[in-house]
Image: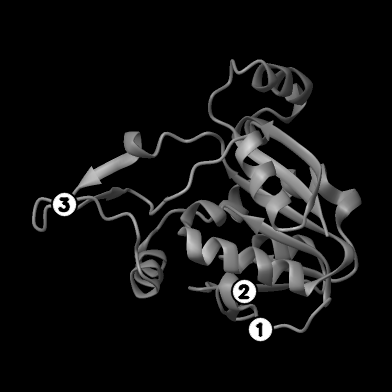
């Protein structure tokens, strides 16, 4: 039995119990460095985790199903508790891969709703992930599921098609070896070249889309 669609309670329980660092903690500084020209005055981080991105951007706001910071509002991408055209920039770091098709579509509509005209939607997701390769097996119930609840896999073409269908215009769509940038910042140009040539496999897809 394959069970990759965790319900909201299971997702919240997982994130409350896990000791893994949030994606924001790992890539926040590099992500902001790469996207600073797209960051406006009003910023929302969707799936804010510990608030690592918020810490880097004064006066920004964040939402998360299982917030680990008192400044973060408890909410999911499919029901963002802010008014229309509220934000210049919305971050969504390592979130979309966790969403089933229904929530994904609703979430993208919500992001579009809260973005100002010509506002920017900044996304990172695992690049072209083989979901089956990361499945694990529960010996008690017999279920097979992705070890961290991923249900979507994206590459440059699939993310562009998804966002285009939801009225977004792609501004930037590239792979980035964030973890290597963090370890070897003085080698960024070489590391990016290796990632572009697909020599580096451990990388993320970075997308900037505009309303």
* Mark 2 Cα-neighbour bin, 10 Å: few <14, some 14–19, many ≥20: many
| Element under disc 1 | loop
At x 49%, y 58%, the residue is 101
Residue at (64, 78) in percent of width and height = 80
Residue drawn where x is 12% and y is 52% of the image: 142
Badge 2 element = strand
x, y (%) of residue 160?
A: 69, 42
On the question of residue 152 being in view, the answer is: yes
Residue at image point 67% right, 68% down: 109
For this view, does 199 lie left or right of residue 60? left
Q: Label 1 neighbourhood size at 10 Å, few (<14), some (14-19), many (20+)?
A: some
| Disc sitting over residue 63 in the figure | 2
Quadrant in which the C terminus is drawn:
bottom right
Numbered circles on residues, count = 3
Judge from the rendering whether residue 3 lies leftward or rightward of residue 169; answer left or right.
left
Q: Give the mark, 3 or 1, whose residue is nearer the N terminus.
A: 1
Q: Are dots 1 and 2 in contact, CB under 8 Å? A: yes
- The residue under label 3 is 138
| Quadrant housing residue 132 | top left
Q: CA distance from mark 3 to mark 2?
A: 31 Å
Numbered circle sitting on residue 12: none
Q: Secondary structure at mark 3?
A: loop
Q: Which residue is mark 1?
A: 81
Q: Earlier in the sequence, mark 1 or mark 2?
A: 2
The way the protein has been coloured in the rendering is one colour
């Amino acid at each position: 039995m394959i069970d990759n669609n965790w319900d909201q309670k299971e997702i919240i329980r997982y994130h409350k119990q896990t000791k893994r660092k949030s994606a924001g903690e790992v890539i926040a500084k590099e992500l902001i460095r790469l996207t600073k020209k797209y960051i406006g005055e009003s910023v929302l981080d969707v799936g804010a985790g510990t608030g690592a991105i918020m810490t880097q951007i004064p006066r920004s706001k964040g939402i998360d199903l299982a917030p680990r910071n008192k400044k973060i509002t408890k909410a999911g991408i499919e029901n963002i508790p802010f008014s229309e055209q509220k934000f210049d920039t919305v971050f969504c770091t390592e979130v979309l891969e966790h969403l089933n098709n229904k929530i994904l579509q609703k979430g993208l509509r919500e992001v579009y709703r809260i973005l100002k005209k010509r506002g920017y939607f900044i996304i990172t997701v695992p690049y072209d992930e083989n979901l089956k390769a990361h499945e694990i097996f529960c010996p008690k119930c017999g279920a097979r599921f992705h070890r961290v609840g991923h249900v979507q896999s994206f590459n440059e073409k699939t993310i562009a098609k998804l966002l285009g269908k939801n009225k977004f215009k792609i501004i930037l769509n590239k792979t980035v070896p964030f973890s290597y940038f963090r370890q070897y910042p003085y080698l960024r140009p070489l590391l990016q070249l290796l990632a572009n040539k697909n020599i580096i496999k451990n990388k993320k897809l970075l997308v900037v889309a505009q309303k």
